[in-house]
Amino acid sequence: MCSSDLFALVVRDADDVVADDAWWIEGIGWLELVPDLDIVGGRVLEADGSVRTVGDFLDGDGHLTTPDRGRAATDPGYLAMALKPRCCAAVHSGALVVRGAMLADAATALARQPVPHVQLGAWLAAIAARRARRTLCTPFVTITPAAKTSHLRSEEHTSELQSPCNLVCRL
């Protein structure tokens, strides 16, 4: 289907605002630089400029969590990690760059088991993890979701995003 040299851009919602029109160049650069990387996503800011996510991580119970949630976008955080690209368990679905070979593998599973858009970043990241591949979140790609999608990471909806590994165990 797809060669590993090809890349696919996935944008979840046309209403999401990506701060830089050349955001995808950052993602492709990381995929070229790191051979075992399959997915590159960006940080998500709330309308007030606070961080919603700079990559999600699995906590001890297997739930996705964002340690930097609520920080100011300019706050570097612990050891300045919030301002550095880093590997994570899942990324926001608003703007992703996905390695072509990984997307080809995921397309077969996606055809059998449709995934809601809000879970696409976590679902793809879980597939990458099963393939022993990495997911990276870079703060150099900044996404501001449309007002109508700002509820997607609220506390009452986090159960939709828990344990991305469970999303692929039925494959």
Image (cartoon, rainbow, N blue to C red):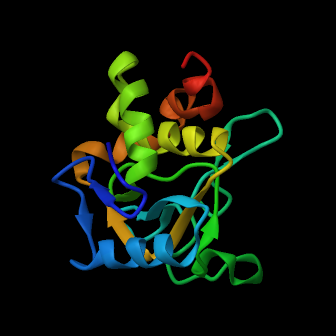
Residue extending furthest toward the right:
60
For the N terminus, the image quarter is: top left
Quadrant of the image containing the C terminus: top right
Q: Nearer the viewer, residue 22 or 63?
A: 22
Q: Is residue 163 visible?
A: no
Q: Nearer the viewer, residue 155 or 66?
A: 66
64 with respect to 49 (left or right):
right
| Position in image of residue 110 (x %, y %) | 38, 27
Measuring from the top left, give residue 81's x and y in whole percent: 68, 77
- Residue 163 x %, y %: 65, 31
Where residue 153 appears, x then y in whole percent? 46, 43
Given residues 117 and 144, the one toward you in this image is 117
In the image, residue 56 sits, relative to residue 77, either above or below, namely: above
Depth check: give the residue in front, 66 or 133: 133
User: Looking at the image, which residue is at 33% across and 22% down?
Assistant: 111
Taking 159 as reference, is 136 above or below it?
below
Residue 103 appears in which quarter of the rendering? top left
- Taking the spot 48% from the left edge, 42% from the top edge, the residue there is 124
